[in-house]
């Protein structure tokens, strides 16, 4: 009789325990918890923070890089990607990287220019004509010279990624220089971009990327300049009536790692990360332009945005109005970089 009672009690206690743990078997694996933790500690974590959506050239490249690093290091290095500014905004990501709170970022060039004016070079109006120009600069001496400027700031440049050419958006049509007068345009914080809108008799308002939609919606600003992929994925087209495909400026990214963190990595791991970055960068160059093209099609088909393609002769007028910015900023950017850019433009 007693043994029946104890068996019954055993079953009831067992069932209650199973219910409490949801019938999970990991109650037992908790015994292996410490061992698992040790393995986790051996793993190298790279926190990669950026501000754009996942289905953009930068968002997709970050995800691809993460999976390539995982594959090439056999899971020893984990790249955790934080998109949409969920970890840091474009105003806080550079100091966070320098402090080592995060290990990798890919800011637009304008955002680096506040710390290192040489990066203003790539904000110059009409700096590149096409993707071929972009790649020649990114892979060549211009890219190398810009990477050197990062070193004194505890940052190491690993690659330059592409997004695409910037287009103008507003609630009024923009074709002639006069159309800009008196309007307020959102810019990324950058002296060259500020001067660009001043030259067009407009006002430039620096606003973080993830606040742009709401500021347009509230009417704090009238327009902006961005790539098709950012206009599309951040739904800026919902709060703008017109877009002019002007290709007047370029938006690309410097992929940067914290220098102290990098120096402490074993050489074989550094090599694998560089290999993954090289593959990702080639892939990014191929798909960035295609993505902007495909999203332009989607904007044409599915949005109310009125799209105007700037004619070549109108473009010449814009260019002439903006070209004096080169001379104005040469002393700030540095003679050498500006002359390399001009050489590139002359080779076209
Ligand atoms: C912007 O602020 O408009 C862009 O820099 C966002 C980005 O990183 O593409």
Image (spheres, rainbow, N blue to C red):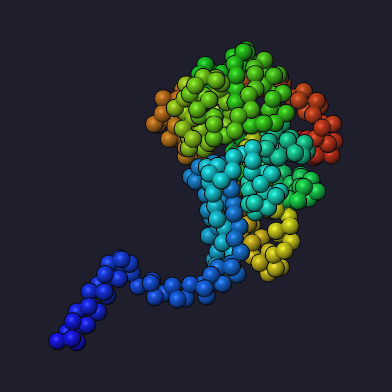
Ligand 1 positioned in quadrant: top right
Residue that extends furthest to the left in the rendered view of this protein:
1
x, y (%) of residue 130? 64, 38
x, y (%) of residue 24? 33, 69
Where on the picture, by quarter, is residue 164? top right
x, y (%) of residue 53? 50, 42
Q: In this view, does 59 lie to the left or right of 10?
A: right
For the point 19% across and 87% down, which residue is it? 3
For the point 55% across and 68% down, which residue is it? 40
Determine if residue 132 is in view.
Answer: no
Give the answer, above or below, for where 171 lies relative to 126. above
Q: In this view, does 6 lie to the left or right of 202?
A: left
For the point 53% across and 25% down, which residue is it? 215
- The C terminus appears in which quarter of the rendering? top right
Determine if residue 323 is in view.
Answer: yes
Q: Is residue 261 left or right of residue 30?
A: right
x, y (%) of residue 176? 61, 15
For the point 60% across and 29% down, which residue is it? 207
Q: Work out whether residue 45 or residue 304 is closer to the camera in this orientation and state it.
A: 45
Q: Work out whether residue 115 or residue 138 is closer to the camera in this orientation and state it.
A: 115
Q: Is residue 220 left or right of residue 271?
A: left
Give the answer, above or below, for where 343 lies relative to 80. above
Where on the picture, by quarter, is residue 174? top right
Give the answer, above or below, for where 56 lies relative to 304. below
């Amino acid at each position: 009789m007693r043994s029946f009672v104890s068996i019954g009690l055993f079953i009831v206690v067992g069932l209650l325990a199973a219910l409490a743990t949801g019938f999970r078997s990991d109650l037992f694996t908790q015994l292996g918890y410490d061992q698992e933790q040790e393995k986790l500690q051996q793993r190298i974590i790279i926190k990669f923070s950026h501000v754009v959506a996942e289905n953009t050239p930068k968002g997709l490249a970050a995800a691809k890089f993460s999976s390539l690093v995982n594959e090439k290091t056999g899971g020893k290095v984990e790249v955790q990607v934080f998109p949409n500014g969920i970890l840091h905004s474009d105003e806080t990501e550079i100091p966070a990287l320098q402090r080592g709170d995060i290990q990798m970022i890919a800011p637009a060039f304008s955002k680096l220019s506040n710390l290192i004016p040489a990066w203003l070079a790539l904000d110059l109006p009409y700096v590149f004509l096409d993707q071929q120009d972009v790649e020649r600069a990114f892979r060549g001496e211009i890219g190398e010279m810009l990477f050197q400027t990062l070193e004194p700031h505890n940052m190491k440049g690993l690659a330059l990624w592409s997004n695409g050419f910037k287009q103008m958006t507003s609630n009024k049509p923009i074709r002639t220089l006069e159309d800009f007068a008196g309007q307020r345009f959102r810019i990324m914080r950058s002296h060259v971009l500020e001067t660009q809108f001043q030259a067009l008799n407009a006002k430039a308002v620096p606003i973080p990327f993830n606040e742009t939609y709401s500021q347009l919606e509230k009417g704090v600003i009238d327009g902006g300049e961005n790539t098709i992929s950012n206009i599309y994925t951040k739904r800026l087209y919902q709060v703008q009536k017109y877009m002019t495909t002007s290709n007047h400026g370029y938006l690309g990214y410097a992929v940067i790692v914290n220098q102290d963190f990098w120096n402490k990595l074993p050489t074989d791991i550094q090599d694998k990360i560089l290999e993954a970055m090289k593959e990702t960068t080639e892939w990014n160059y191929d798909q960035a332009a295609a993505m902007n093209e495909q999203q332009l099609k989607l904007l044409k088909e599915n949005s109310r945005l009125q799209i105007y393609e700037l004619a070549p002769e109108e473009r010449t007028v814009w260019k002439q109005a903006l070209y004096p910015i080169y001379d104005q900023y040469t002393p700030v950017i540095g003679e050498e970089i500006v002359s390399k850019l001009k050489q590139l433009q002359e080779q076209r």
